Amino acid sequence: MEKLGVFKVVDDVLECCGFFSSKEDALAYLVEVKKLIDNTLQNSLAGEYIIVPTLYFKINVAGQPN
């Protein structure tokens, strides 16, 4: 399945923030992050973010529910 991965750049390392099904969902996430920074002063969220197209796989152990 193709999804968009949102990553934050922290000390030259990419930290995964989540996977989204559409560009609109990924951008909505970043808008919410911006609101948190502006409204609640959660400065730890400030920084560079990257949206990357990904191939997303969820592989389960046999016999366990999805």
Image: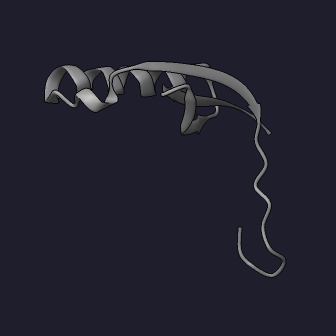
Q: Is residue 7 above or below residue 57?
A: above
From the top left corner, tell me how far across and down residue 51 is, in percent. 60, 21
Q: Residue furthest front?
A: 11
Q: Residue at x 64, y 33 (%)?
A: 21
Q: Would residue 58 be found to the left or right of residue 18 on screen? A: right
26 or 13: nearer the viewer: 13
Q: Residue at x 57, y 20 (%)?
A: 50
Q: Would residue 47 be found to the left or right of residue 64 on screen? A: left
Determine the image quadrant of residue 32: top left
Determine the image quadrant of residue 58: bottom right
Q: Work out which quarter of the rendered image holds the N terminus and state it.
A: top right
Q: Residue at x 67, y 23 (%)?
A: 52
Looking at the picture, the colour scheme in use is: one colour
51 or 31: nearer the viewer: 51
Q: Residue furthest bottom?
A: 63
Q: Residue at x 62, y 26 (%)?
A: 22
Q: Would residue 11 be found to the left or right of residue 38 on screen? A: right
From the top left corner, tell me how far across and down residue 12 is, in percent. 55, 25
